[in-house]
Image (spheres, rainbow, N blue to C red):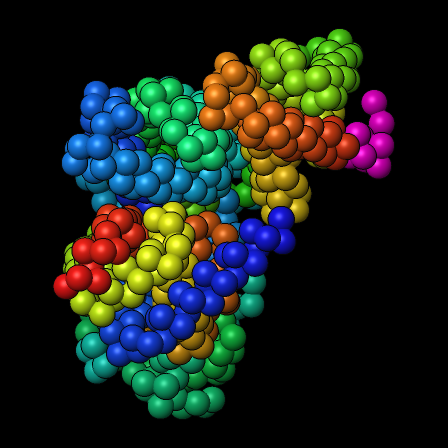
Amino acid sequence: MSHIVNKQRNILDFALSSLLRRKGRNLALVTVYTLVVFALASVMFFTQALKKEAALVLGATPELIVQKMVAGRHDLIPLSYIDQIKKIRGVAAVTPRLWGYYYDPLIRANYTLLVNDTYPLPEKTIAVGAGIARVRNAHRGSKINFFAYDGKPVVLQVRGILSEESELLSSDLILISAADFRRLFGIPAGYATDLTVQVRNQKEIATVAAKIQQFLPDTRPILRDEIMRTYEAVFDWRAGIVIVVLLGALLAFLIFAWDKAAGLSAEERREIGILKAIGWETADVLQLKFWEGLSVSLTAFLLGIILAYIHIFLAAAPLFATVIKGWSILYPNFRLTPFVSFSQIAVLFFFTVAPYTVATIIPSWRAATIDPDQVMRT
Amino acid sequence: MLFTPAIIALFAGSLITSGLLVAAAGYGVQILRHWDLESGSELQLKLERQTYLVSTLVAYAFAFELLSLFLFIYTADNLHTFFVGAMCAAGSLNANPWGYPVIIFRMVNFLLAGLWLIVNYTDNKGYDYPLIRMKYALLLVIAPLIVAETVVQAKYFFGLEPEVITSCCGALFSSQGASVAADIIAFRQGPLELVFGVTMVLLLGLGVFVYRTGRGGYFFAAAAFLAFLVSMASFISFISIYIYELPTHHCPFCVLQREYFFIGYPYFLTLLGGAITGLGVGLLHPYRETRSLKGILPGIQQRLILFSLIFFVSFTAMAVLQIIFSNLTM
């Protein structure tokens, strides 16, 4: 056993020294390789972290939302529906929600307005997210001007600023009182934006949803699980698209790698010829090439992954954020929770190391089967 | 179809492996047709060089198969969130009829590729390529199977429709599928425990006998294969429940998750390793009388038997320890 290990160690030794002898060329290869790994790894780390974040956030959302549909569009829901839903066995509570979007022409962004029933605000006051506070230069006590649906101005006083820890969720959020909300958007009493339904037994949620659909055919019940699935699919799909785009770059890299491996210099050919003349077998030269490839791959792979980690989790993904996060104007400032899994590494391996290895098999074999006398005569 | 990075990677990986194997099989056909060790022609020299290429190609393909077998299970596991009622890989593999065939293809191909490497190793030890025809005939069996695996896997992935929100109404399209995770056929526990014990004792006894006398290699291979199947069934039937500490949970995939400290990997790796080495003993057995292998083959077979026994004994030891130290008592 120790004989085999020693042999491989010696071959690895030789491989490393021969890589170092051709520093410039291999450095170029490792650089390009690292960049490819870096790009792919960034996309994957980022989507995975966003998926985690979304799952955490959605874990706290209501398990069932009921919206009213008119002509295929989401419409205001009459509060009279609440009693009908409450009659369904298994429903614990039905709560109306008031929320909406307000476009602020001043900073050309949408705010999310929400009426919080748990901690109701007094009339004429609001609490704003950290993102809004930044762009509007707002602080406690300052006043923000809104225009109601009929064009009349509504002045609201900032009563508090939402904590920065929740910025991913609350960056563009404004908490407002119910009366102000209705005045701002002209929503008549007796209507809400949608209803949330609490169900006692988790297993009955789908049944309750089906019953709501049956009693109130003009509504659309939405399950939390469905929202989570949809988010997951959307993030994965976006990552898939970006990766397919990057596959072009990967292909270019493979051609580059093939070319590097195939274009043996006369000096290298002579080296292999001498090795074989002094007793190396074809299999040994193949192993040498294997260790060379492995050293290059591992170096580039690890470097690429570390760089991607820094890019995503320490620098907040400046390069890919716009594509994968969405197209919002008020970007929240947030740091993603670092998360790297075995499957991500394995997937990256299949995208980079596997094709690289395959691209270099035939060139290495060509090199390994060189006839010693032929090379040394030239 | 789902469009996740892992699926694209698996798809790409399968295409690469198929490509490697088809290329290798192409060289294999040439070698089978024109191989003539007596000849010193240029063609024969070329063919001898190509054998190096083929074994490198297959070795890489084998490594990729091993990694992608587990990546596939892991991915299937992650996909369960897209399907109503699926709790782990068992559910998402059931999402369409192609899921389980992929797993079976992957296992068979993994075993075959491992066997090929054993034959290749032995062949390289003999000075006159004694196993060359058998080796390349085997390659011609593996290549179509790997291609079939790629096709079936593509069918599986392309056929997956995640249950996301539709614009008209969410709830009605979420069919309430029953949870299939736990209901994988559970054999009756008592008799199977007995069969498992008997098989392992039989394998161990046979192993010692074949190791010492060098006779009965076929029986050992058959016993190893039997032990592989029985162990799989036992794992699902009565070993898994001690890992989950839940008498109704038999899933063979959940053990691969973080919650169970990835304990499934050593179990399945020892089983696959034991099966490959055990079958290898039988595959090499007919060549014991070959002149160039006479002095080498018994040693190789002995080592294979040793490895096979170590793998199966470790599996059994892990299972027994699990059963003893589990909080579950049946």
Residue A345: image location, x then y, percent: 44, 55
Image side of residue A152 versus residue B173, left or right: left
Part of the protein shown in magenta: B320-330
Q: Position of residue A106 (x, y in %)?
A: 21, 82
Question: Does B6 appear above or below A250?
Answer: above
Relative height, residue A227 to residue B307 (above, below):
below
Question: Looking at the figure, which quarter contains the C terminus of chain A?
Answer: bottom left
Where residue B11 sits, quadrant-wise, is: top left
On screen, residue A36 versus residue A169, left or right, reads: left
Q: Residue at position x 23%, y 56% from top?
A: A373
Q: Nearer the viewer, residue B243 or B127?
A: B127
Query: Residue at (25%, 74%) from the top-left corner?
Result: A25
In depth, the one of B220 and B41 nearer the eye is B41
Nearer-the-camera pick, B308 or B18: B308
Residue B221: in sight, yes or no? yes
Residue B165: quadrant of the picture: top left
Name the one closer to the observer, A33 or A129: A33
Q: Is residue A25 magenta?
A: no
Question: In the rendering, at what x and y percent does residue A52 appear?
Answer: 47, 57
Q: Residue at x 49, y 71 (%)?
A: A166
Q: Is residue A254 left or right of residue B8?
A: left
